[in-house]
Image (cartoon, helix red, strand yellow):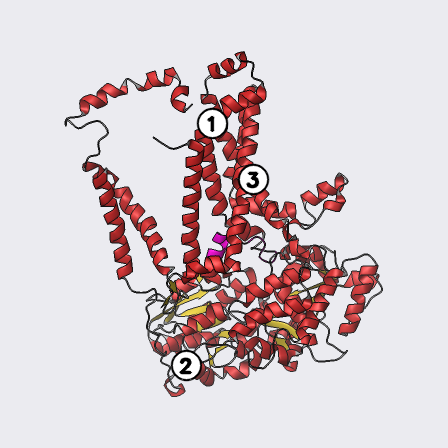
Amino acid sequence: MTHTVARRPDVAAAASPALPTRRSGRRSRRAPGEPRRVGYLYIAPALVVYGCFVLFPLVHAAWISLFNWDGLGPSSWAGISNYTALVTDSSLRGPFVHSLVLLIFYAVLPVAIAFLLAAVLSRHQLRGMTFFRTVLFLPQVIAMVVVAVAWRSIYSPDGLLNGVLHRIGLGSLTRAWLGDFNLALPAVGLIGTWVEVGLCLVLFLAGAQRIPRELYEAARMDGAGAIREFLVVTLPGLRGEASVALTLTIVAGLRNFDLVYLTTGGGPGNATSVPSYEVYHRAFDTNEVGSAAAIGIALTALIFVVTFVVSRAVEGPRS
Amino acid sequence: MRSSRKISAAAVLAIVVATVGACAPGGTTKPKKVATKPPAQITTNAQTAGKVTLTVWDQEVRGGQNAEITALNKQFMAKNPNVTIKRTPRSFSDLKTTLKLAISSGNPPDVVEANQGYPDMVAFVKAGLLQPLDSYSKVYKWADRYPATLLNLNRVSPGASSFGSGNLYGISQTGEFIALYYNKAKLSSLGLKQPTSWAQFTSELATIKAKGQTPIEFGNQDKYPAIHTFGVIQSRTAGPTTVRDLVFGTGSQSYDDPQTVQAATTLQEWAKKGYLTPGANGLAYDDAAKKFASGTGVFLMTGTWELADLAKLGKDLGVMLPPPERAGGKAVTTGGEGLAWSITAKSKHTDVAAAYLDFITNPNAANVMTRTGNLPAMASTAAASLPAGSAEAQVFAAWKQLSTDDGLVPYLDYSTPTFYDTITAALQNLIGGRTTPSSFGKTLQSDYGKFH
C-alpha cells in the first residue's frame, strides 16, 4: 500500500503532455535518467557555496574537536579524548539524555496529537477550516524568542498557568514551573509540543486530502467504523507525511537551543541543559572550543542516525 | 553511479586533506612576551602623536552609559584634534561573543573593554593579546585614583595562572556593589526600622514573614542572582579578607570551611522559612525587581545597577549597605567594578590609547559619570550636588564608605574558570532543598581544589 496506488488519475493525465517534448529534445542515445558529466556544471555554483559554508566548516569543526583549544592561544593535540568525555563525563552525558527526553515532547506528542486532529478534521467538513489551520500553524511562524518570552511569563510563579489553576480550585498544584527540578524539562518540552503540533497538522491535512475518497467508501462498505477507518486508510496513507513530520520535529528537538537559553539557561541546577546549549556555553563562556566542537559533531551524527532510522522505519525500505 | 561516488569521495577527501594539512588551531608555539615601554619613554601628550585613528570597542550601550562615553569621546577629540575615535558599541553579550575573534585577529581594535575573570581577561593575557599597563600606571599615578582592591581586580599574574595580583591590564570607570534596597513605607507600616546590625535585619525578616509579607524579593531563574545574596552572607560569616584570599587562591582556605557552610545553612534556612520569594528558582531576576518596584516585598538585595529601574518606587525607595555584623561596624559587601578598559598588544598607538584611558577615568570624567547617572569608581566632586537623602546620594555615600573601610569582596564566580557553572547550579540546588549545606561546600571545594 504505497502512494502509487493512491495517485489520482487526473494528476497523472495533467503531467503526461510534457513527456513527449522532453523525449524529442534528447539528442544522444543515452538511456533516460542516466547521469551526464555536464550535470556537475549545473550543480557547481550551489556545490561551491555548500562546500564553502557547510562542508568546510563541518570538517574544520571535526578537526578542532581533536584538540584542547581555548579559542585564542596555542592548542594541544587531544586525540579522541573530547569524544570519550561525552560518555564518561556526567555533565556531558546529561544534556544528551535530556535531549532524548525532549524528543518525546518535540516529536512523539506533536505527531500523535496531529494525527488525532487530522483524523477528526478530515472526516467532517468544518466551517472556518482555513482559520483554524492558520491559528494552529501560527506558533511555527512566530520567532522562537517571542515564544520563549511568552511561555516564560505563562510559567512564572504569578503567571497565567498558576492563575488558572487557582481559579479552578487546583491551587495546591501551583508552583514555579521552570524552577522545579522534576518539572522544568517537561515544561520546556511542552512549549516544543505547542510549537510543533501546527506543523504536523498542516502536513497531515494536506496529505489526507490526497487519499482517494473511494478508499474510505470501500472501508465503510466493509463495515469499518471511524477508528478502523483511521487505522487502515488514513494512517497508511499518511506514511510519507509522517516521515517528513518526524524528521523535522526530531531535528528541531535535538538542536533545541533558543528555548532553553531563553527560558531556563539550563537550570535549575543542570536539569534542562541540552547539547546545543553546551556547545554555545563551552565555546563562548568557558573557552573549551575543542570540547564544544566535539559536542557539535556528536550532535550532528546523532541527528543523522536518528532521522535515518526513523525515515527507514516509517517509510519502509526504498526499492 | 560508481564514478560519481568516486568523485564525491575524492572531493570529501580533498577537503579533509586541505584542512588536516593546515596546522593545529591557534598554532602550537607559546605566545611571545608582550614588549612594554619603560615610563621614561612614554609621551602623555596625545597632540604630538600626529594623525591617529583610535578604534574602540565598548559595551556602554545603555542610556546613561552611552551618554557618558559619548560626551567624554567628544571632549577627548576636542582636546586632541589630531585624534579620531572610531567607536564600536556592542551590548555586553554581543561583545562577549565577538571580541575573542576581533582581538585575536591580525588587526584588532586599539582599546577594548575586557571582562574580568578567567574566561575573558585572563585568557586574553595568556594568549599575549593585551598590553601590560604598569608603566602607564606609574606615569599617570592610577594607584592614587583607585583603592587597591579595585585595581587588583584588573591584575593578572605572570604566566596568567591567576588574577587579583601581578601586572595591570586595564582600568575601570564605574563601581558597583550589592546593596540592600528597602521599601520605607512598608517597613514603617510593619512597625520596623532600617536595620543597623545583621542580627536586627535577621529578626526583622522573621517579623515580616509572621505578618504575612514577603521579607526579601528574590528571583533566581537566571542562576547568577544567588551568587550575590550568598556572597553577602558569606562575607559576614567569613569576613572580607578570608573571602578575598579564597577567591584569588592566595590563602589556605577552602570552600568546605565551617564559615562557608554556615553561610549556606543561613541561605537555605531563609528559603525554607519563607524569607525569600517562594519558588525563587522559577522567578526571573527582572520580575523579582519589578515586583519590588511595584510595592511587594520589603527588601531586595541586588546590585547598584538596578537603581534606575527601581526609581518607580519613588520616595519610598531606601538604599543601604547590607548591615554590618554589629551596629556601627565596618562596611562589607560583595561588589566590583565595570569592565576593564584595556589596550591590545598589537595596537600601534599605545601612548594615545593610554592617554584616552587616563582621560575617561580622571576627575573630570568622574563628574561626567555622576551627572549622567553612573557611579564612578573614583571620587567625584559632583556627587556633593546630588539631592541630600535621595537614593543616588545614599549610593554614593555607601560607595565612599566601602572604599574607606576597604570592605569590597569580589564576586565568588571569579574563583576558578568553571566556578560560575559550579556555584550557580549548586546554589539552585541549595535553595531548592536538593542538597545539604555541607555537601554544597564539598561540591564547591571539588571544583576549587582542582584549580588551586
Q: Residue B226: image x %, image y %?
A: 64, 63
Up/down of B390 relative to A183, above or below: below
Q: CA distance from mark 1 to mark 3?
A: 20 Å
Q: CA distance from mark 3 to mark 2?
A: 63 Å
Residue A270 painted magenta: yes
Q: Which mark is residue B5?
A: none
Question: Mark 3 falls on what kind of element?
Answer: helix
Question: Mark 1 falls on what kind of element?
Answer: loop
Disc 2: which chain? B
> In the picture, which quadrant includes the N terminus of chain B?
top left
Q: Amino acid at mark 3?
A: Thr
Up/down of A107 relative to B309, above or below: above
Which of the pair B296/A193 is nearer the observer? A193
Q: Which mark is residue A238?
A: 1
Q: Quadrant of residue A304?
A: top left
Q: Residue at x 34, y 74 (%)?
A: B348
Q: Which mark is residue B44?
A: 2
Q: Quadrant of residue B214?
A: bottom right
